[in-house]
Amino acid sequence: MSILLDTTFLSPLRLTLQVASVATLISLVAGIAAAYILKRYEFPGRNILDAVLTLPLVLPPTVLGYYLLVLIGRRGVIGQFLQEQFGIQLMFTLKGAVIAAAVVSFPLVFKSARAALEGVSGNLENAARTLGCSEISVFLRVSLPLALRGIVAGAMLAFARAMGEFGATLMVAGNLPGKTQTMSLAVYSAVQAGRDDLANTLVLAISIVCVAILFITSKLVKPT
């Protein structure tokens, strides 16, 4: 019980929940928007864009971390601009950890949202348009409610993935105790330090949360 009150457990737990929550929210908004655009509009390169948006799901974490370094690192295209213009630093900060987790978890929301939205009957959407609803109204009042179960399932999987993110986070945010050290990074540090009790507690906590999420997700996607 004492280990549960130890800051070496509570701090990574708190940071993990913060990072995973914000990252999931970002992935949810971006994933739904991307899914709706690809479902609603036909344009050249549509399939290529779909592949690019899904790429973080299959790329090795170190490769994804390198791409993020190129983009948001101190000398990166985005990172250097933010640093020089606004004084915002993303490397080795909690913001960097959130970005890494959001990028890694994004495809899970995107693919789930797209499948759910494409499963919505076009006849219902057309009927709403016939009644004078705008495209935004059709999406908010017809498409989104009907696709909600699938989207929520994807968001839960994204949350679990964000909780367990390691490789890209290590490269972008580092492993700074109390600042950027999430539970997966804390497990690595505990094993390196020979603290098996802490490692076991962290692993058990992550496993319980992930099993619970997978169980709830299976209930959500199960046909009624």
Image: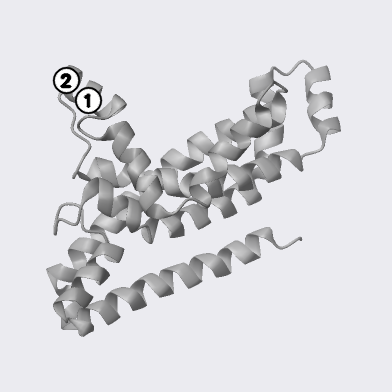
What colouring method underlies this structural image? one colour
Give the distance between the C-alpha atoms of the residues marked 2 and 1, in whole angstroms: 6 Å
**Residue at 70% across / 31% down in the picture?**
39
Where does residue 164 sit, x and y in percent of width and height? 38, 61
Q: Is residue 187 visible?
A: yes
Q: Quadrant of residue 191?
A: bottom left
What type is the residue that disc 2 sits on? Glu
**Residue at 34% across / 39% down in the picture?**
68
Residue 46 higher or lower than 20, as above or below: above
Q: Which residue is mark 1?
A: 80
167 vs 128, left or right, is left
Q: Quadrant of residue 138?
A: top right
**Residue at 34% across / 74% down in the picture?**
205
Q: Which residue is mark 2?
A: 84
52 vs 187, left or right, is right
207 vs 187, left or right, is right
Q: Which quadrant, please, contains the C terminus?
A: bottom right
- Mark 2 is surrounded, within 10 Å at the Cα level, by few (under 14), some (14 to 19) or many (20 or more) other residues, namely few
- Are the residues flagged by discs 2 and 1 in contact, CB closer than 8 Å? yes
Considering depth in this image, is 164 or 2 the residue closer to the camera? 164
Where does residue 14 sit, x and y in percent of width and height? 24, 59
Q: Which quadrant, please, contains the N terminus?
A: bottom left
Q: Is residue 140 visible?
A: no
Q: Secondary structure at mark 1?
A: helix
What type is the residue that disc 1 sits on? Gln
Considering depth in this image, is 18 or 38 the residue closer to the camera? 38
**Residue at 71% across / 33% down in the picture?**
142
Q: Quadrant of residue 12?
A: bottom left
Where does residue 201 sit, x and y in percent of width and height? 28, 79
Q: Secondary structure at mark 2?
A: helix
139 vs 204, left or right, is right
Considering depth in this image, is 138 or 217 the residue closer to the camera? 217
